[in-house]
Amino acid sequence: MDFHSERVQTLPPYIFSRVYKRKKELEESGMDIIDLGIGAPDLPTPTFVIDELVKEAYKSSNHRYSPYSGSQEFREAVAHFYEKHYGVTLNPDEEVLTLIGSKEGIANLISAVINPTETVMVPDPGYPVYESAIHLAGGQTTYLPLEAEKDFQPNFQQTPKTDYEKSKLLILNYPNNPTAGTVEVDVFEKAVSLARKYQFAIAHDAAYDLVTFGDYRAPSLLEVSGAKEIGVEFGSLSKSFNMTGWRIGYVVGNRDLIQALSIVKSNTDTSQFLPIQKAGAKALLSDLSTVSENNQVYEGRLDFVMSVLEEMGIHVKRPRGTFFVWAKVPEGWSSMEFSSELLEKAGVIVTPGNAFGKSGEGYFRISLSVPNERLNEAMSRMKYLLTND
């Protein structure tokens, strides 16, 4: 008997599972594998955040259920962060909702907003979870192409008018995973204008908002006048405070969209463990110096990786955000062929670009979230493979 629903059975193939199955097989055979595919920080969670967790975990009052919308302390900390960092004013009671990581929030928002057969527009290339969540909600996907020549900004002009007309929701993601593309606020202004014209909502995935280099500051969708009327923005503490396993994030913006999401969530979960929320509040209320220190580490790794890629004849535009490098595969290879060869012969995992959609073909993604020694070894192996193949 098959207990899988049709929606589960027909999920798009998840390339990552195949890669990690092969990784396990090779490790069991004795091969040393260096994983540059995973998008999770290797750096430690700040000590002051851990200390806050421990302190709050000792309080028996924190071992009860959280309010469905999250603790007051966390929601107020999110509002304070937006006021200080973006100059955006939020009502913590109606325009902020606590999430068990932004991933679940995005997936649940899609279920909260669309009816079966309705359409969501997603970036191409883009984070695979968007399309999977649309599929599980019974929706349809259409694609917003990203322009490689313009730092992977959305190509609003080449998107057919009919795609805008049939879309109920547009998902944006900057700084972008997987391409590391970045934008200025004018891109969000154009998106808000289109949303008003064609009457669709916007969800901006800003998981990498604080992972930036040099003097670049990633803008918020909510900095645009009128954005709260049609959009929400998702944030996460995973990347900026090295808290991936803590599962703590938030959504801010349009109160009607947030209310719809809160209804789904109140029927499926009871928010995150209160001490985690209170430790997250401590992080958001900090001076962000630990974030800057993390970014300096990633930038040093970025310099090294780009220099080695250049030596191999692989030219990459220097990214201004995320801890990813998005590069073209060497001539003569497909994305999957190159990543498979690198795994089988060099013991190095990179993510094939086609894992992120049709437009990802011809690229591969390197994650900088591995210790320097392992990153150096991985790039040495890659260089040896390409120069001796």
Image (cartoon, rainbow, N blue to C red):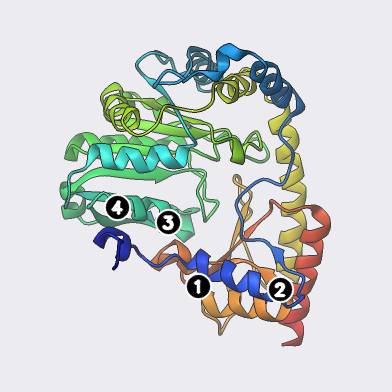
**Which of marks 3 and 1 precedes in the sequence?**
3
Q: Circle 1 is placed at which residue position?
A: 362
Q: Quadrant of residue 93?
A: top left
* Element under disc 3: helix
Asked whether, in this view, residue 316 is left or right of residue 190, the answer is right
Whether residues under marks 3 and 2 lie with C-beta atoms below 8 angstroms apart, the answer is no
**Which of marks 1 and 4 precedes in the sequence?**
4
Whether residues under marks 4 and 2 lie with C-beta atoms below 8 angstroms apart, the answer is no
81 or 302: nearer the viewer: 81
Residue located 45% across and 53% down the image: 127
Whether residues under marks 2 and 1 lie with C-beta atoms below 8 angstroms apart, the answer is no
Q: Circle 3 is placed at which residue position?
A: 128
Whether residues under marks 1 and 3 lie with C-beta atoms below 8 angstroms apart, the answer is no
In the picture, the quarter occupied by the C terminus is bottom right
* Element under disc 2: helix
Q: Quadrant of residue 226?
A: top left
**Which of marks 2 and 4 precedes in the sequence?**
2
Distance Cα–Cα, label 3 vs label 2:
28 Å
Q: Circle 2 is placed at which residue position?
A: 28
- How would you rate the neighbour count of disc 4 (Cα within 10 Å): few for under 14, some for 14-19, many for 20 or more? some
Going by the numbered disc 3, the residue's amino acid type is Pro
Going by the numbered disc 4, the residue's amino acid type is Leu
Distance Cα–Cα, label 1 vs label 3:
17 Å
**Which of marks 1 and 2 precedes in the sequence?**
2
Q: Quadrant of residue 20?
A: bottom right
Q: Circle 4 is placed at which residue position?
A: 136
* Element under disc 1: loop
Which is more foreground, mark 4 or mark 1?
Answer: 4
